Amino acid sequence: MKKYIIHSDGGARGNPGPAAIGAVIKDEQGLEIQYISQKIGETTNNQAEYKAIIAALEKALEMGVEYAECFLDSELVVQQLNHKYKVKNKELAPLFLKVHNLSLQFKKISFHHVMREKNKEADRLVNEALDG
């Protein structure tokens, strides 16, 4: 089973404010296979983070990915996806559920928190969408 690496990020300028998502999907050798960079309207940072991983997982499933290792720089979202934190925000609950349901379609999936410096490509894609 071939593993794919997903780096995703979402951001809003203002909270809420104009928002965008960015994601990079790479193969095991680190070769970029696909990327996402788009505006998503007005939303919060946490909602944008969720929408970024949703878009990345949907794209990965379209590509036939079965094993995804996902890296996000939002500790809150990662801890919620790993069932360490409860989802208390009513706007985040349906987004969490969407990620959960998408996750079930993979043979193997994991979510990891990384510092922003380790998520530069996805962060750059967010800023390019917001600036573009």
Image (cartoon, grey):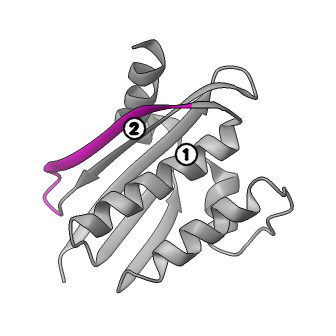
What's the residue at 28%, 78% (across, down)?
66
State the residue position of label 2: 122
First along the sequence among labels 1 and 2: 1
Residue 127 shown in magenta: no
Outermost residue to the top: 131
Q: CA distance from mark 1 to mark 2?
A: 10 Å
Asked if the magenta segment contains residue 39, the reply would be: yes
Label placed on residue 73: 1
Q: Is residue 31 shown above or below 1?
A: above
**Residue 85 disc label:** none
Residue 42 appears anywhere in the view: yes
Note whether 116 is above or below 96 in the view shown: above
Which secondary structure type mostly characterizes the magenta part of the structure? strand
78, 132: nearer the viewer: 132
Task: In this rendered view, identify the residue nearer to me: 34 or 111.
Answer: 34
Q: Nearer the viewer, mark 1 or mark 2?
A: 2
Residue 100 percent across, percent down from the top left: 57, 74
Horizontal side of residue 50 vs 76, given as left or right:
left
For badge 1, the amino acid type reads Asp
Q: Are marks 1 and 2 in contact (CB under 8 Å)?
A: yes
Label 2 CA crowd tier, 10 Å (few <14, some 14–19, many 20+): many
In the picture, residue 87 is in which quadrant? Answer: bottom right
Residue range corresponding to the magenta coloring: 28-40
